[in-house]
Image: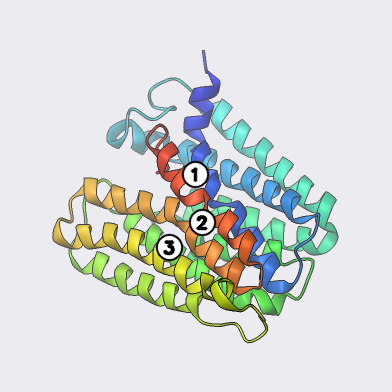
């Protein structure tokens, strides 16, 4: 019988801590932080979980060979239940986004959902895979900005998308291991991402320690994720690659916190970044990859 623990493993439940910060960072950048932001973040989480369930359904035959311990190949979750859960979570996420954010939110949630399913079913194992997944995260940031000026959130969306490209590029070598060139490329990308998040925003009027928060948080992000990638440079084995992917997922809230603080919401940025150590702790119980 399928248990809640099995479903939590299927959707990588703790990894969802890396999701609300997308919406919050987008809302902060666009000047759209309001009572709708938590609900939009909830919609984003539902779509993320849908993508994780759809991913394992699409990979069920490959996982039977490479990762037989996962919920579907191990027999703990039936394939029909997984794809049904993915469809239901997608519908719930789209419905919630439209209900709280109206047409503007729906206009971003629909292509976000389409990109998630497109990645899982079509793009994942192609050269376009990292770009499609990066687009998913960029659209997620813009979903949070849907109640304000979208153009102001484009830099934040691009920054999160670039980070996502590095994680996705690494994830494609979780089973086979990587050559040394790949982590060097992703490490360079991480440095650029951190620098982008730390750059001052001319619209923000923060002073003192609050003004320094984007640089502090982006440095924290770069140090943790960068260290994991540096380990892959030295030892590009599958285990090291999986560890770096996990660090990229669980470290994302620190980057989102930097972007939120850059948008003028310093204390909220700290709250978003606090999900990073919590995510690392939970990842020891349920793998985020």
Q: Which residue is mark 1?
A: 15
Q: Does label 3 or label 2 sit earlier along the sequence?
A: 3
108 sits to left or right of 266: right
The answer to whether residue 127 of the structure is visible from this angle is no
Mark 3: few/some/many CA within 10 Å (<14, 14-19, 20+): many
Residue 119 x, y percent position in the rendering = 50, 54
Secondary-structure class at tag 3: helix
Query: How far is mark 1 from mark 3, CA to CA?
Result: 18 Å
Image coords of residue 111 (percent x, y): 66, 60
Residue located beneath label 3 in the image: 130
Q: What secondary structure is marked by label 1?
A: helix
What is the CA distance from the residue labelled 1 to the residue labelled 2? Answer: 11 Å
Tag 1–tag 3 contact (CB < 8 Å): no
Q: Secondary structure at mark 2?
A: helix
- The residue sitting at 71% across, 45% down in the picture is 93
Q: Nearer the viewer, mark 3 or mark 2?
A: 2
Q: Which of 39 and 173 lies nearest the eye of the viewer?
A: 39
Residue sitting at 39 percent across and 56 percent down?
248
Q: Nearer the viewer, residue 250 or 78?
A: 250
Please tell me which residue lies in front, 219 or 192.
219
Q: Residues within 10 Å of mark 1 (few under 14, many from 20)?
A: many
The residue carrying mark 2 is: 253
Is residue 124 visible from the viewing direction of this image?
A: yes
Q: Residues within 10 Å of mark 2 (few under 14, many from 20)?
A: many
């Amino acid at each position: 019988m399928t248990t809640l623990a099995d479903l939590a493993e299927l959707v990588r439940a703790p990894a969802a801590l890396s999701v609300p910060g997308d919406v919050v960072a987008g809302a902060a950048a666009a000047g759209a932080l309001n009572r709708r932001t938590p609900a939009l973040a909830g919609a984003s989480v539902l779509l993320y979980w849908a993508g994780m369930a759809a991913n394992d359904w699409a990979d069920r035959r490959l996982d039977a060979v490479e990762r037989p311990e996962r919920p579907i190949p191990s027999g703990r979750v039936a394939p029909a239940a997984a794809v049904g859960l993915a469809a239901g979570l997608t519908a719930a996420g789209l419905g919630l986004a439209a209900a709280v954010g109206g047409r503007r939110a729906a206009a971003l949630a629909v292509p976000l959902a389409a990109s998630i399913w497109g990645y899982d079913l079509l793009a994942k194992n192609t050269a376009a895979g990292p770009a499609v997944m990066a687009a998913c995260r960029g659209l997620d940031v813009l979903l949070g900005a849907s109640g304000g000026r979208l153009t102001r959130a484009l830099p934040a969306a691009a920054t999160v998308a670039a980070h996502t490209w590095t994680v996705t590029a690494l994830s494609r070598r979780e089973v086979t291991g990587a050559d040394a060139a790949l982590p060097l490329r992703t490490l360079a990308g991480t440095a650029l991402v951190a620098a982008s998040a730390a750059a001052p925003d001319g619209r923000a009027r923060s002073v003192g320690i609050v003004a320094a928060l984007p640089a502090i948080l982006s440095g924290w992000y770069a140090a943790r994720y960068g260290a994991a990638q540096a380990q892959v440079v030295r030892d590009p084995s599958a285990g090291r690659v999986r560890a770096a992917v996990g660090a990229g997922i669980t470290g994302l809230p620190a980057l989102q916190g930097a972007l939120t603080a850059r948008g003028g919401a310093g204390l909220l940025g700290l709250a978003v970044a606090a999900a990073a150590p919590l995510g690392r702790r939970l990842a020891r119980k349920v793998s985020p990859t």
